[in-house]
Image (tube, rainbow, N blue to C red):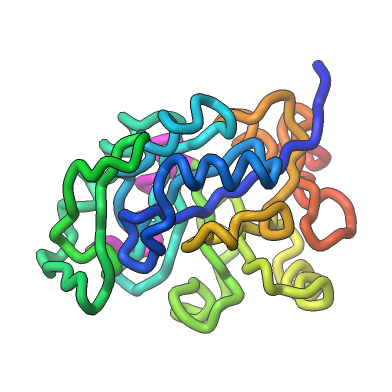
Amino acid sequence: MTLSPFWVDLHLHTVLSPCGELEMGAPDIVEAYRRAGVALCAVTDHNAADNAPAVAAAAGGSPVALPGLEVQTAEDIHMVVIFPDNEAAADFQEWLWLRMPPVENRPEIFGDQLIIDKDNQILGEQEILLVQGAGYTADETAEEAMGRGAIVILAHLDRPSFSYEAVLGPVPDDFPCHAFELSPSVSHADFCQWRERYPDRVFIRSSDSHRLADISRARCTVMMMETPSFEEVRMALMGLNGRSVLCPWGGGIAAEKEKNGG
């Protein structure tokens, strides 16, 4: 087994997210990741996974494009959940939408919510507003996603809104997730403070791209893996079988569970 460093971005928006720019089409996203040399991305539109198949089809495995969602919980906390295949992501979305409030989108205010194919042909438009809290709490969402075998990440923990810390305060030690995401703007000094507060957690950096210019290695994370894949990312986040997350802010490896018998 040979492990190599791969650039990974686990938080990305397409034209389905009303806050995403109209330039965030499937082939355009793929080309941006190829230029940046990023090997794996996760398509995580707000509360929906409908455009993940388009990006994966456009990519053809380069980069690997995983399906996911950025869930907005009942408390207005953002959480990234990522699945190994489109069927699993769609099943989770169906569960999530059992409690999605029937608030209609107003494109002139919030933006378009377009469902596309791999060639950017418009297949439809989501009429329900995606940037709203679903009816599940953060704990319920994390437990359901973990139970379905998803990768679970608390999104942009450093932000003053839509983050766990901003809404509920410090994250409990037993909160079920694989990683804490910090924004690309976080400095090394700030990261050290976060690391001191949560020494047993894995930290990653993701682009949270809403426009093509946001896609770059400077906004991503390096993982030591055998190949870029869902299972390899999961093992890297858990520190299993030699896989690891290289701290984006320096200071060595962030995933150390294997050393402790994890």
Residue sitting at x 26%, y 36%: 91
Residue sitting at x 86%, y 59%: 250
Observer-nearest residue: 236 or 15?
A: 15
Left or right: where does residue 46 sit relative to residue 236? left
Residue sitting at x 34%, y 60%: 17
Question: In the rendered image, which quarter is residue 103 located in?
Answer: bottom left
For the record, the magenta segment spans 135-150
| Residue 133 shows in the view | no
Q: Position of residue 93 (x, y in %)?
A: 27, 45
| Residue 255 shows in the view | yes
The dominant secondary structure in magenta is helix
Observer-nearest residue: 111 or 248?
A: 111
Q: Position of residue 218 (x, y in %)?
A: 73, 58
In this rendering, the answer to whether 100 lies above or below 229 is below
Observer-nearest residue: 52 or 2?
A: 52
**Quarter that holds the N terminus:** top right
